Amino acid sequence: MTKSEAPDQLQWCKYVSVTRAVCRVSALTNDGTIIMGSTRLVAVDVDGKNLKLLGQSTSPYDAYSRQYDGEVIDWMDGRSGAVLMTRQYIPEEYKMNTRLVRDKIGLGVDKIDTASLRTTAVESANAKASGFMGDGRGNVRLMWAAAVTATGYLSGELAYYYRTPTSKDWHQLAVAADGDWEPLAIDAASNQLYVLKSYNGRHALFAITLSDSPSEQLIAQNSYVDIDNVVRAGRARKVIGYTFAEDTRRAIYFDPDFKTLSASLSKAIPNLPIVDFVDASTDGNKLLIFAGSDQDPGRYFVFDRSTKSLNEALLARPKLDGRPLAKQQSVIVPAADGAGIPAYLTLPPNSSGKNLPAVVLPHGGPSARDEWGFDWLPQFLAARGYAVLQPEYRGSAGFGDAWLNKNGFKNWRTSIGDVTASAKWLASKGIADPKRTAIVGWSYGGYAALQSAATEPGLYKAVVAIAPVTDLAMLKEDFRDFTNYKLVAEEVGSGPHVADGSPLRHAADIDAPVLLVHGTLDANVSYRHSQKMEEALKGAGKRSELITFDGLDHQLNDSAARTQMLARIGEFLDSAIGH
């Protein structure tokens, strides 16, 4: 196989001064053995000129490939055009009798002028460092290092080190398994590190004072869901509150100014309850605000603090403006064992809500979750006349350790059982016509669609699986050449559940027609999962179709490809369950 590359993709851009922006670009390559992703940070003038790479330049003598060149950890004052960023240093392996050969290795931190590329070293390259965090005032205050096994695989354990405001010495703060202890932000004014950690079976928010004798304070907990992030504002990225998602996402502000402003905004734009403070002018007088809802993809506003004026600036999806969109509601679905499964139900606009063709839409992950708000895939399905149910099956993230239930691979029977119960609930409530119910999923959701159809033949009249995992043993092998192989292998586990929970091995049990969709440069779930599933289905005499997008990744981030995919999904579902 020849080397192939996907087109570069622009992930995001952020102003670093009035005239200059920093952007992240990503790409995927396939050398015939592995698919490898890479990202680069670039700086560019607002008119598109003077494009420059911010990471260490690539050398033909580099000892190994540079996947990630670094990330911005401090956006500085917004005037100078400088940033504080981590940089991945790779030594040259070609040895010459010269001092010009590069020998730095590991992650360092540099202050970089994004226009001239003048660089000042802030933290020397450290081969053991995995990340750094700044305090918003140009100071590096936190470092962490990932433990590695003797065979070179990540062990899943991280050690965290901190600095006091007046010292350059590193002090150990914590050692924890990845995901059990998550640093979010450092607030320089209070000298506190905000961190998520397990507390009473859920993630809670703590503040740790970064002094010679660190002290810890519980800031927030929720008896139903995990606290998931902090809210920050201004160039100094001051911590002003925290967030969590119950039926809907909420932000709690402990900063009095933003608490008052949030309350005022809820009155000024009552139909757009999802509000995010996106950015601020250098002086903090003007705020860029995003607001949206389930029936509005969102719009951006500029709020002027001095005049107290709020002006709409930009629509997130202009082509949907004025078009009637479906309303989304929270429901609780009873599982087979009596547990209550949180779910989101979306009904077609102006429908009766009864005896409809329906689609069960399990999310990916499995350790992820859906949230209330605009979502393009259920809105597409609802616009075609389908009732859509998105179950937060056990294995979903955000509802605490017990609901995570190890994960949706090891305990696939519980997760898939919850998905199956959701389909049956739709019929029992008279919402869905049981003879016209389908299941659609992406990634783990695609796995859930196939496995649910295999364990409950006849329940669904059509199955759509986008970039699905189809074999659990193959999933583990896909990561053997990567440092996270051990972590993936532990997540999937070993034992009878691996074969029992692999739809590839049960293709003959699936009665419904299957539509598979996959990109050939998928680094998350190998394209061969869909290839082999298609072969197994055809070999078992089943109706199946595989749509292949050459050169695209797991997300299929291409407008033309997604348009083609949605059109085919629409045709496929219409022919199977009508609309």
Image (spheres, rainbow, N blue to C red):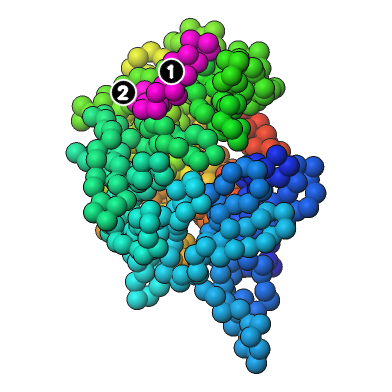
Mark 2 or mark 1, which is nearer the start of the sequence?
1
In percent of width and height, residue 111 lies at: 58, 58
Give the CA separation, mark 1 to mark 2: 37 Å
The structure residue drawn at horizontal position 63% and vertical position 66%, both measured from the top left corner, is 56
Helix, strand or loop for disc 1: helix
Residue toward you, 213 or 574:
213
Residue toward you, 309 or 245:
309
Outermost residue on the front side: it is 166
On residue 333, which mark appears?
2
Query: Circle 2: is it few (<14), some (14-19), or many (20+) Cα within 10 Å?
Result: many
**In this picture, residue 72 sits left or right of residue 419:** right
Q: Based on the picture, tell me whether residue 272 belongs to the magenta stretch.
A: no
In percent of width and height, residue 305 lies at: 56, 20
The structure residue drawn at horizontal position 65% and vertical position 92%, both measured from the top left corner, is 97
**In this picture, residue 392 sits left or right of residue 305:** left
In percent of width and height, residue 93 lies at: 59, 83
The structure residue drawn at horizontal position 41% and vertical position 32%, both measured from the top left corner, is 240
Q: Is residue 171 above or below residue 187?
A: below
Helix, strand or loop for disc 2: strand
Query: Circle 1: is it few (<14), some (14-19), or many (20+) Cα within 10 Å?
Result: few
**In this picture, residue 519 sits left or right of residue 49:** left
Give the residues drawn in magenta, as a range. Answer: 245-271
Q: Based on the picture, tell me whether residue 249 belongs to the magenta stretch.
A: yes
Q: Amino acid at mark 2?
A: Val
On residue 260, which mark appears?
1
Q: Amino acid at mark 1?
A: Thr
Quadrant of the image containing the C terminus: top right
Q: Can residue 473 be seen at all in this image of the molecule?
A: no
